[in-house]
Amino acid sequence: MPFPFSAIVGQDEMKLAILAAAVDPGIGGVLAFGDRGTGKSTTIRALAALLPDIPVVEGCPWRCDPGDAQALCEECRARQTRGPLRSRMAPVPVVDLPLGATEDRVVGALDIQRALAEGVKAFEPGLLARAHRGFLYIDEANLLEDHLVDLLLDVAASGENVVEREGLSIRHPARFVLVGSGNPEEGELRPQMLDRFGLSVEVTTPGDLPSRIEVIRRRDAYDRDPAGFVARWSGAEAELRGRILAARAGLHAVAVPEAAYERAARLCLALGTDGLRGELTLIRTGRALAALEGRGEVGDAELRRVAPPALRHRLRRNPLDEAVAGTRVERAIAELFGP
């Protein structure tokens, strides 16, 4: 019974980033770096109970979407030729990738039990299969082994997991939102991995007394009576779930005026970001935010709010400017958009 998402105190930037990724998975995932004990894992795991169920093909190990014929696996395509696919509703998967996971555990491997008992070569799906159409969560992402980082980068780029080993040749869809957390004091994330996250948020310990007291009060109430605490927040959770559904439905109707494209490009030029992922992420996240808040157009207000998480991890190191990345982004926003 996860802690309710709506009951989390503060951490507004992190909650906004996660909600935006839930509305538009194409944003590219969320990285949350900050102090220990600030609720990073709690916030991410709270997402599982918040998200509405999704339709899946009954009996499909990859939980294909019956409404998306282009994304069906080979088995579902073959079944579709014999008649309509049966479907059911299932929770959105939020799968943990532990630091000590082996490559077989992540990508899948030969099902040893069936091989010994039945003498057949059957595939046992791994964590990537379980995370399809959901979220793959990596706690302490900066400590993940290099070979697993390379593997995740390949799958995240292609949306497909290919396993060829032990006489098996399996190819299955693996599209997921990558969510990572970590403490920068324990090591930096590899640049290749960092670039794959659409949004990067900084999580800090609350600095004001009322917020700290409220965090303690709510956590203590949850620990003493989880079911009762969750029930008290069920109304707020239902309201937020409805906002996510409405935002998904209205996402493509949100207009992006020419001025917003120009603002995004000017901001990235001023900051010297590499490539064009910064601009694309700015626009997509701004559109998701506008949809969440019921607005029909992306304007300066949306771009100002999403620029720090969309750009702070894309800046080059500047030996002549010792300011941290977040400060540089805020300074550029003030120069472009005004105070």
Image (cartoon, grey):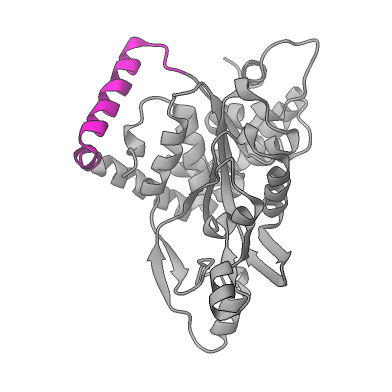
Residue found at x 78% / y 33%: 274
Task: Name the image quarter holding the C terminus.
Answer: top right
Q: Residue furthest right?
A: 319
Residue found at x 42% / y 74%: 87
The answer to whether residue 37 shows anywhere in this view is yes
Residue closest to the eye, 143 or 208: 143
Question: In the image, is residue 153 above or below residue 199?
Answer: below
Prevalent SS, magenta region:
helix
Question: How many marks on residues?
Answer: 0
Highlighted range, magenta: 205-232
Residue 64 pos. (x, y %): 53, 68
Residue 197 pos. (x, y %): 64, 39
Residue closest to the eye, 242 or 215: 215
Question: In the image, is residue 169 above or below residue 16?
Answer: below
Is residue 4 found left or right of 339 in the rendered image?
left
Residue 329 pos. (x, y %): 65, 21
Q: Quadrant of residue 214?
A: top left
Q: Residue furthest front?
A: 116
Residue 223 lies in magenta, yes or no? yes
Task: Name the image quarter holding the N terminus.
Answer: top left
Residue found at x 40% / y 62%: 90
Residue closest to the eye, 299 or 11: 11
Is residue 134 found left or right of 270 in the rendered image?
left
Question: In the image, is residue 144 above or below residue 321?
Answer: below
Residue 68 pos. (x, y %): 55, 69
The answer to whether residue 298 shows anywhere in this view is no
Residue 192 lies in magenta, yes or no? no
Q: Quadrant of residue 104?
A: bottom right
